[in-house]
Image: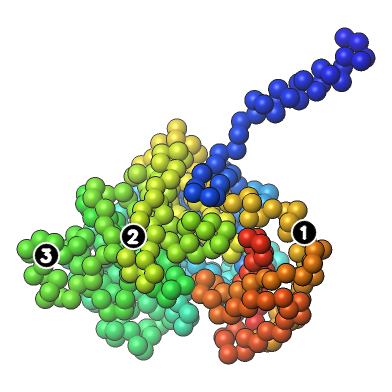
């Protein structure tokens, strides 16, 4: 081959490589295209994933591991292995939640099963040491909850009043779900030291009862608490959870639509689901989506399923009390989907769990994948928008300043709490905007800036 031929040959080879390189998987929506990217793989039964204040994805694995995953590089760091965690079938390390004021109170709450004359379940608070990147100093909030190899729940959520919600399954003891004094088949509410809040409805830990096995929970920015719950062979449910309510199990499956069920519902003021599925999907983790990054999915519940191995978008009505449309994506594409979380910039992360004893590793290994609108997070466009927050952290009074490489145009600024609830909004051109949030409690918040269909985010810490 002559010297003059080599550049042309190399050009042809590059052209062939570009033409035949596999395309990045995408989801085509009405006006938006989402790319699908694996950020971590070769995991072992990831159960809970959530977005951390360090901009990493925090994760539990059912065998007792707590890990952090860098969504940009895929780096995985192990924070904890719980030696007495007992895993069999559906039991093991399950739910996790971080303290909403994590910057000043770095507490991590976990639920796992252990052996003590049978399977039991406990909720433990750990403290994160940033220098060692480990979880230390376990403090037991509650333990001795009856467990089983199946029907153990358990999701965790911290409410705005800084009380902790914990879901428990019926542990295959169905009548216990209707017993307000039993800890199984419930939503339990406790203070962050494990004590009973004075305004709990039954003077014990029970917040709501009549649950079979709730494995999804999210407090949406509309103020409603949603939960997904496994049915038997029928009637998986999506519920709105209210304090003191009875959700019917085991006497009612799904809606109050049978003669015996109708009588029980009337006599016991049973709260019906806003949606039910028969045959069951094995509904799992949920999150609420209301971000402009994917406009088609705003005001929706995002739902993962195990048996059906798909990802569902449940569009809500304006009041948030009804599902008006259901869309199905990734049907059998990845295998069993265990959980979902939404980042402040609108990206979506999914936990894939094919090694949980009921899936098939042939469907793909256990991993975390990212769904995002590339147009919404274009790096070149982000670099054209430079803003500062000063001071940050602050006492609730700070200034948002920005400059643009282009002429000044309108922008929208939103500040939301960790649950996605909007607490501040501004629209205009002010390049030096004073903000006062002193009427809100201390904690971590997320600032979102929107301009020309683009979104930028930053953390705001109030002491």
Q: What's the residue at 40%, 83% (across, down)?
A: 195
Name the residue nearer the viewer: 19 or 420.
19
Q: Is residue 175 left or right of residue 30?
A: left
Residue 257: in sight, yes or no?
Answer: yes
Q: Which residue is mark 3?
A: 261
Q: Give the spatial CA distance, label 2 vs label 1.
A: 39 Å
Nearer-N-terminus badge (3/2): 3
For the view shown, which residue lies furthest in the left direction? 259
Residue count near mark 2 (Cα–Cα under 10 Å), binned few <14, some 14–19, many ≥20: few
Mark number, residue 324: 2
Q: Name the element at disc 2.
A: strand
Q: Is residue 13 left or right of residue 448?
A: right
- Image depth: mark 3 or mark 1 in front: 1
Q: Which residue is mark 1?
A: 383
- Image depth: mark 2 or mark 1 in front: 2
Q: What's the residue at 60%, 74% (across, down)?
A: 414
Q: Is residue 290 left or right of residue 241?
A: right
Quadrant for the C terminus in the image: bottom right
Place of residue 101 in the rendered image (x, y in percent of width and height, measured from the top left): 58, 77
Choose top left, top right, bottom left or bottom right for residue 16. Answer: top right
Q: Name the element at disc 1.
A: helix
Q: Give the spatial CA distance, label 3 vs label 1.
A: 59 Å
Image: 183 above or below 332: below
Asked if disc 2 and disc 1 are in contact, CB closer than 8 Å, the reply is no
Place of residue 437 in the rendered image (x, y in percent of width and height, measured from the top left): 62, 86
Nearer-N-terminus badge (3/1): 3
Choose top left, top right, bottom left or bottom right for residue 402. Answer: bottom right
Q: Give the spatial CA distance, label 3 vs label 2.
A: 25 Å
Instruction: Count the numbered circles shown.
Output: 3
Nearer-N-terminus badge (2/1): 2
């Amino acid at each position: 081959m002559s010297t003059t031929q080599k550049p042309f040959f190399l050009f042809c080879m590059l052209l062939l490589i570009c033409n035949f390189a596999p395309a990045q998987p995408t989801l085509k929506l009405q006006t938006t295209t989402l790319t699908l990217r694996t950020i971590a793989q070769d995991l072992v039964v990831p159960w809970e994933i959530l977005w951390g204040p360090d901009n990493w994805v925090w994760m539990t694995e059912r065998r007792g591991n707590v890990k952090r995953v860098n969504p940009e590089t895929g780096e995985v760091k192990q924070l904890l292995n719980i030696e007495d965690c007992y895993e069999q079938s559906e039991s093991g390390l399950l739910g996790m939640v971080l303290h909403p004021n994590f910057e000043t109170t770095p507490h991590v709450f976990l639920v796992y099963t252990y052996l003590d004359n049978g399977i039991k379940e406990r909720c433990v608070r750990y403290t994160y040491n940033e220098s060692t990147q480990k979880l230390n100093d376990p403090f037991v909030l509650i333990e001795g909850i009856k467990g089983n190899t199946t029907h153990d729940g358990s999701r965790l959520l911290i409410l705005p009043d800084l009380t902790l919600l914990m879901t428990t399954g019926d542990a295959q003891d169905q009548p216990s779900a209707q017993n307000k004094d039993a800890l199984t088949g419930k939503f339990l509410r406790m203070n962050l030291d494990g004590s009973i809040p004075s305004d709990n409805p039954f003077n014990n830990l029970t917040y709501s009862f009549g649950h079979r096995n709730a494995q999804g929970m999210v407090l949406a920015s509309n103020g409603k608490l949603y939960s997904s719950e496994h049915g038997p062979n029928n009637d998986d449910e999506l519920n709105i959870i209210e304090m003191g309510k009875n959700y019917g199990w085991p006497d009612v499956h799904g809606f109050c639509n049978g003669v015996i069920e109708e009588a029980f519902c009337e006599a016991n003021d049973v709260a019906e689901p806003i949606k039910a599925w028969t045959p069951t999907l094995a509904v799992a983790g949920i999150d609420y989506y209301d971000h402009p990054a994917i406009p088609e999915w705003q005001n929706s519940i995002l739902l993962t399923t195990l048996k059906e191995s798909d990802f569902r978008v449940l569009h809500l009505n304006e009041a948030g009390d009804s599902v008006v449309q259901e869309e199905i994506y990734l049907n059998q594409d990845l295998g069993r989907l265990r959980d979902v979380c939404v980042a402040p910039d609108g990206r979506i992360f999914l936990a894939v769990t094919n090694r949980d004893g009921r899936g098939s590793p042939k469907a793909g290994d256990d991993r975390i994948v990212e769904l995002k609108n590339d147009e919404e997070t274009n790096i070149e466009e982000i670099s054209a928008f430079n803003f500062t927050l000063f001071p940050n952290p602050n006492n609730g009074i700070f200034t948002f300043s920005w400059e643009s490489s282009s002429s000044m145009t309108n922008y929208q600024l939103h500040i939301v709490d960790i649950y996605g609830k909007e607490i501040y909004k501004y629209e205009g051109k002010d390049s030096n905007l004073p903000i006062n949030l002193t009427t809100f409690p201390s904690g971590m918040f997320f600032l979102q800036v929107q301009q020309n269909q683009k979104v930028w985010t930053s953390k705001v810490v109030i002491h």
